[in-house]
């Protein structure tokens, strides 16, 4: 089952990285749900800026960890490169 790794931009311009099997549902939860990630809940609205498709849970979590280790500048470069494709 495919999994997604994603980067959200929060209202305060900070970036949030996560992974999920249902990207549309998860972004909706970040913006509207009472439960979920506290980080995004207090920085709404969030906008989806980047996604990657992974083959499974383990790959998605590993990629999520890689992205979280990037600097902000590297994350922004990744987002801009994906837009230019």
Image (cartoon, grey):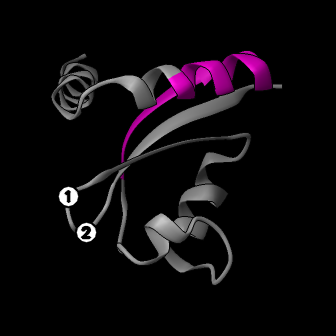
Q: Which dot marks residue 11? A: 2
Q: Is residue 5 left or right of residue 58?
A: left
Name the residue located 60 percent from the left edge and 54 percent from the top edge.
24
Kind of element beneath mark 1: loop
Name the residue located 66 percent from the left edge and 24 percent from the top edge.
60
| Residue 55 on the magenta span | yes
- Distance of label 2 from label 1 (alpha carbons): 5 Å
Q: Is residue 68 left or right of residue 38?
A: left
Q: Can residue 27 be seen in this snapshot?
A: yes
Q: Say above or below: 79 vs 25.
A: above
> For mark 1, what is the residue?
13
Kind of element beneath mark 2: loop
Q: Which residues are magenta?
A: 48-65
Q: Quadrant of residue 32?
A: bottom right
| Residue 41 on the magenta span | no
- Expressed as whole percent of the image width and height from the top left, the position of residue 57 reads 78, 26
Residues at discs 2 and 1 in contact (Cβ within 8 Å): yes
Q: Say above or below: 28 vs 16.
A: below
Name the residue located 15 percent from the left edge and 29 percent from the top edge.
73
Quarter of the image containing the C terminus? top left
């Amino acid at each position: 089952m495919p999994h997604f790794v994603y980067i959200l931009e929060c209202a305060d311009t900070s970036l949030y990285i996560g992974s999920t099997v249902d990207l549309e549902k998860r972004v909706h939860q970040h913006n509207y749900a009472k439960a979920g990630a506290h980080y995004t809940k207090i920085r709404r609205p969030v906008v989806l800026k980047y996604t990657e498709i992974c083959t499974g849970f383990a790959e998605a979590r590993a990629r999520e960890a890689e992205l979280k280790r990037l600097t902000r500048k590297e994350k922004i470069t990744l987002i801009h490169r994906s837009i230019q494709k």
